[in-house]
Amino acid sequence: MKRNRRPTDPGTILKTYFLRPRELSNARFARATGLSRKHVSNIVNGKVSVTPDSACRFARVLDTTPEFWLNMQTAVDLFDVQKRLADWRPAEIHPVALN
C-alpha cells in the first residue's frame, strides 16, 4: 500500500504519548535510559533514528517492546527512501525463476 503521508516518527510518539503524559523531561528520561540528554533530544526532535540499542532501552524504561520502536523507525525510513528513489529504475531486473 502506498502512503501519501510520512509516518509519524518515533521521537514524536515518544514525546507526545510517553514523556508528556508522565511529565518526564528529556533529561530525566535520558538518565533513566542511560543515554545522553543530547541524544534523547535528537531522537525526540527527529534528528537521529531510533537504533536497536535505544529501542531496547526505551522498551525497558517504558514497559513497551523494542519492536514497537523499531517498527516505527522502519516505517519512516522506508517512506523516506521510497520517496527518494521514486524515479530510479534498475538497469536490469532478475526475477526469481519458479519451477
Image (spheres, helix red, strand yellow):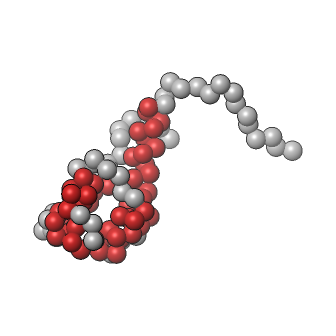
Residue 49 visible? The answer is yes
- What residue is drawn where x is 43% and y is 62%? 52
Q: Quadrant of residue 27?
A: bottom left
In this rendered view, identify the residue nearer to me: 47 or 75: 47
Residue 87 shown left or right of residue 38 in the figure = right
In this rendering, is residue 62 above or below 92? Answer: below
Task: Residue lying at the far right in this picture: please name it.
Answer: 99
User: Can residue 21 be spotted in the picture?
Assistant: no
* Position of 90 relative to 49 (above/below): above
Which quadrant holds residue 94? top right
Q: Residue at x 41, y 39 (%)?
A: 80
From the viewer's side, name the closer residue of 40 and 3: 40
Q: Residue at x 21, y 72 (%)?
A: 31
Give percent across and percent down for residue 15.
21, 58
The reply, left or right, for residue 23 in relation to residue 14 is left
Quadrant in the picture for the C terminus = top right
How many numbered callouts?
Answer: 0
Instruction: Pinpoint residue 17: horizontal percent, then vertical percent.
Output: 23, 62
At horizontal 44% and vertical 31% (from top left) the residue drawn is 84
Q: Nearer the viewer, residue 92 or 12?
A: 92
- With respect to residue 79, does 74 lie above or below? below
Task: Point out residue 67 in the picture as x, y percentages from the top left corner.
Answer: 44, 64
Horizontal side of residue 88 vs 38, given as left or right:
right
